[in-house]
Amino acid sequence: MNPFLAFCSLLALVSAGPTQYFKEEFGDGEAWTSRWVESKYKSDYGKFILSSGKFYGDAEKDKGLQTSQDARFYAISASFDSFGNKDKTLVVQFTVKHEQNIDCGGGYVKLFPSTLKQEDMHGDSEYNIIKLR
């Protein structure tokens, strides 16, 4: 095999990485509020804030959504373009930082269908995938 062709083939394989459908790093200050929609289904949902929390490596780069009130339910969503992953592996990755010692509680990520009405999202809203943390 021609070494140049082998190199080009290898380069194409390396550069053809996975498709990224959604990524959020909260690096643009309060602009996250235009991408994320807090549900208004119940009036007593807790409010999210942007924070790096009590411990972090970099105060700016480690910012994320933080729950701001104890003993509340929270509901927030961000939309992205529809996609299909038939015959492909789908990886859902997220980070959760628990700063309190709690006896019960937790969090999860749900992937909803594109028909979700974000302001009406609630615990019984239809979803396609759930990932507990």
Image (spheres, rainbow, N blue to C red):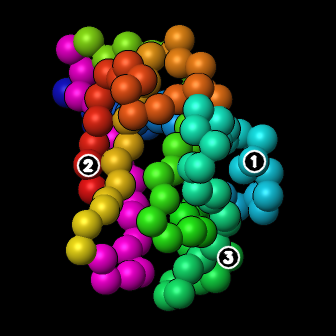
> What's the magenta bit mostly, secondary-structure-wise?
loop
Coordinates of residue 15 in the picture (x, y in percent): 43, 37
Q: Amino acid at mark 3?
A: Glu
Residue at 64%, 72% in the rendered image: 51
Label 3 neighbourhood size at 10 Å, few (<14), some (14-19), many (20+)?
Answer: some
Left or right: where does residue 39 sit relative to residue 88?
right
Residue nearest the viewer, comparing 96 with 126:
126
**Toward which corner of the image does residue 13 lie, by quadrant?**
top left
For discs 2 and 3, the disc positioned in front in the rendered view: 2
Whole-percent x and y of residue 92? 33, 41
The residue pinned by badge 3 equals: 60
Q: CA distance from mark 1 to mark 3?
A: 17 Å
Labels 2 & 3 near each other (Cβ < 8 A): no
Q: From the viewer's perspective, tell me whether residue 7 is left or right of residue 71.
A: left
Q: Is residue 40 above or below residue 26?
A: above
Q: Which of marks 3 and 2 precedes in the sequence?
A: 3
Mark count: 3
| Disc with the residue nearer the chain's start (1 vs 2) | 1
The quarter of the picture where residue 96 lies is: bottom left
Residue for point 59% across, 32% down: 41
Q: Nearer the viewer, mark 1 or mark 3?
A: 1
- The reply, left or right, for residue 67 in relation to residue 109 is right
| 1 or 3: tag closer to the N-terminus | 1
The residue at the point 24 percent across, 74 percent down is 103
Q: Can you identify the residue that label 1 sits on?
A: 33
Label drawn at residue 113: none
- Give the amino acid at mark 1: Thr
Q: What residue is drawn where x is 24% and y is 21%?
A: 88
**Range of the magenta residues?**
87-102
Q: CA distance from mark 2 to mark 3?
A: 26 Å
Q: Which residue lies under the disc numbered 2?
A: 132
